[in-house]
Image (cartoon, rainbow, N blue to C red):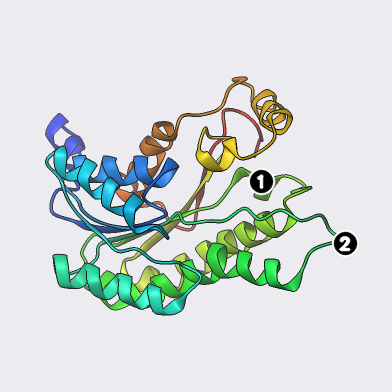
Amino acid sequence: MTQTRSSLKAQFDLDGRVAIVTGGSRGIGLAMAEALGACGVSVAISSRKAEACDAAVARIEAAGGRAISVPGNMGDLDDVTVLVAATVEAFGGIDMVVNNAANALAQPIGSISAEAWEKTQAVNERGPLFLVQEALPYLIASPHASVLNVVSVGVFTSGAGLAMYTAAKAGLLMLTRSMAAELARHDIRVNALAPGAVDTDMMRANPEEAVEYMRAGSLMRRLAEPDEMVGPALFLLSDMASFVTGSVLVADGGMTFH
């Protein structure tokens, strides 16, 4: 097939689709939600704080997009059910799920509590799995179904100091591959995005020496801006990546090599 300018642009066209973005009220999730809204996608934004979700919706609507606020905790499976139901009620279906919500609880090995472990797994791994399962009937019905699981470049490192977080994200990466394999028969693509060090509230919560260590660990010697994760995300969610599934796209400024 000979590609033309119009056919190439059409592959990036997301107009009229519906997306759920968890952790969509700040940082990488907000950047993705705003970008999807700008591309004509109707976006359901979820995070734990209702005010933050409402503010994100207001930003998208002010730019001419469509969005709804569905506050919830991805560690709570009842909230997962409510999120899917509210999205379908508002927009009639679901084409894309962006699993971005996360927590980064940090306890050293030898001091990890069962409570912290369960909380980390619930938000970072269990929630994404059950959100996709809850949305599955609508993804199957969509002609453009795509799932994007946001993991971390930490899954390709030792994870020292962040064992709970990186273990959960490594599990989400494995779930990405399993979902891709099992859902391919429904024409549902499932991929992962592994950001490096990004200038977000989560990053700024670290001690300055830790931030500097991560900054220096990149070949580009800087933190990424949240908007720099938008391009990789839109590629994986769009029809431009129609033959890409079960993959992880690393956007880390040269922190790791594969």
At 64% from the left and 22% from the top, the residue drawn is 219
Badge 1 crowding class, 10 Å Cα cut-off, few under 14, some 14 to 19, many 20 or more, is many
Residue identifier under label 2: 110
Badge 2 crowding class, 10 Å Cα cut-off, few under 14, some 14 to 19, many 20 or more, is few
* Viewer-closest of 37 and 207: 207
At 16% from the left and 32% from the top, the residue drawn is 4
**Residue 13 seen in the current view:** no
Q: Secondary structure at mark 1?
A: helix
Q: Secondary structure at mark 2?
A: loop
| Farthest residue, direction front | 51
* Viewer-closest of 192 and 84: 84
Nearer to us: label 2 or label 1: 2
- Determine which quarter of the picture holds residue 234: top left
At 24% from the left and 59% from the top, the residue drawn is 144
Query: Which quadrant does the C terminus fall into?
Result: top right
- Counting from the top left corner in percent of width and height, residue 82 is at 31, 75
Placement of 64 over or under 244, stated as above or below: above
**CB under 8 Å between discs 2 and 1:** no
| 76 left or right, relative to 30 | right
Q: Amino acid at mark 2?
A: Gly
Residue identifier under label 1: 154
Is tag 2's residue or tag 1's residue first in the polypeptide sequence?
Answer: 2
- Counting from the top left corner in percent of width and height, residue 166 is at 67, 54
Q: Amino acid at mark 1?
A: Gly
Marks 2/1: CA–CA distance? 20 Å
| 252 left or right, relative to 1 | right
* Viewer-closest of 47 and 89: 47
* Viewer-closest of 141 and 130: 130
